[in-house]
Amino acid sequence: MSEVIVITSGKGGVGKTTTTANLGVGLAIRGKKVVLVDTDTGLRNLDLLLGLENRIMYDLVDVTEGRVPYKKALVRHKKYENLMLLPTSQVKDKNAVNPEQLVHLCEELRKEFDYILIDCPAGIEQGFKTAIAGADCAIVVTMPEISAVRDADKIIGELNRADKNSIKLIVNRIRPQMVEKGDMLDMDDINDILSIDCIGQVPDDEKVVTSTNRGEPVISMEDSLAGKAYRNIVGRICGEEIPFMDFPKDSFFQRLKRAFGL
Amino acid sequence: MIEALMKIFGKEKKSSKEIARDRLKVVLIHDRANVSPEVMDHLKNDIIRVISNYMEINKKDMEISLANDEDSVALVANIPVSRMKHG
């Protein structure tokens, strides 16, 4: 049984594309056949995060407009053979693809792949409606920041209105030290406010930046905390029960130093 | 100094996270109910008009707001009555 998952957020810059790339690689490492569909038309980035920007021949709009069969537009990952990318167009706008076309494409992709992950554009306009059209379930990415949580709530409302009721939450870029000081919302707070089950919490990790620079998603880095968080999420998507990780806490001495501004 | 000590033991008056939580809860009630301040204002004026047929009310001190009660939203109105109208 294949599954179509849309990764969405409402607010831009919370890590939708990073999440899509990492979950895609993680599922591929587990031997699943995965295709990532970038629907952020006009603002193509998923190719960059995967290090595939130089291999694109055709794009999503070429496929939906019938110029090439979808198989011709797929880009195979260099390292993970069962991971494919369907890049989007960098020149067309977000309305270049309509919901019916994407639903049809998802039905085709289901025949070949175990997981179809759709990277959704920011916002709640047509691009969002198109991206969610063919999805079985949604992952809403948010950050422990009031504007991101508010937008996530809005998106959850829109998903419900579109009868997409299987929704999971990822809280991205948590800073454990700020949470500990009481200066940042934690996963439980956000869970409580949004009333949506969390499938993961990802700490803010410099390795996300360095891995993005290289075009290698952080999930493949064994020593990264964010990478571990993403590996846990992939396990949960595959149906495993994995407890949420504890972040390293400050010692009494570190709190003492900070309190005196040292 | 006392503030520094309080920080060490993790006790502060109200953390910024609690403020964020409270603000979010209020704003989401309005977002979810899809009620703009403008609509609330119209509602308030309509309520004043209807109630004024029966009693004199203190418009200045009257409060109308949406409140969250578990999973439902309630319309809470506090309308001070100055005098009943007769006949």
Image: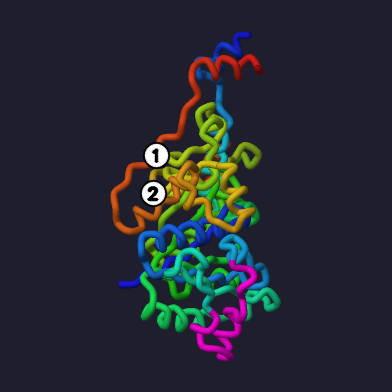
Of B80 and A104, the residue lying toward us: A104
Distance from Cα at disc 2 to Cα at disc 1:
9 Å
Q: Chain of mark 1?
A: A
Residue B4 horizontal/vertical position (percent): 60, 13
Question: Up-down: is A143 above or below A100?
Answer: above
Q: What residue is at 30 percent from the left and 56 percent from the top?
A: A239
Q: Residue furthest bottom?
A: A67
Can residue B87 be spotted in the picture? no
Q: What residue is at 57 percent from the left and 48 percent from the top?
A: A208
Residue A49 lies in what quarter of the image? bottom right
> In this rendering, would A104 be left or right of B80?
left
Residue A211 horizontal/vertical position (percent): 58, 51
Magenta stretch holds residue A55: yes
**Is the C-beta separation of discs 2 and 1 under 8 Å?**
yes
Q: Which mark is residue A245?
A: 1
**Residue position for label 2:** A232
Magenta stretch holds residue A201: no
The amino acid sitting under disc 2 is: Asn
Q: What residue is at 66 percent from the left and 18 percent from the top?
A: A261
The N terminus of chain A - image quarter: bottom left
Category of crowding for the residue at label 1, using alpha-carbon neighbours closer than 10 angstroms: few (below 14), some (14–19), many (at least 20): few
Q: Secondary structure at mark 1?
A: loop
The amino acid sitting under disc 1 is: Met
Q: Chain of mark 2?
A: A
Q: What residue is at 55 percent from the left and 47 percent from the top?
A: A143
Q: Magenta segment range?
A: A52-73
Can residue A51 be spotted in the picture? yes
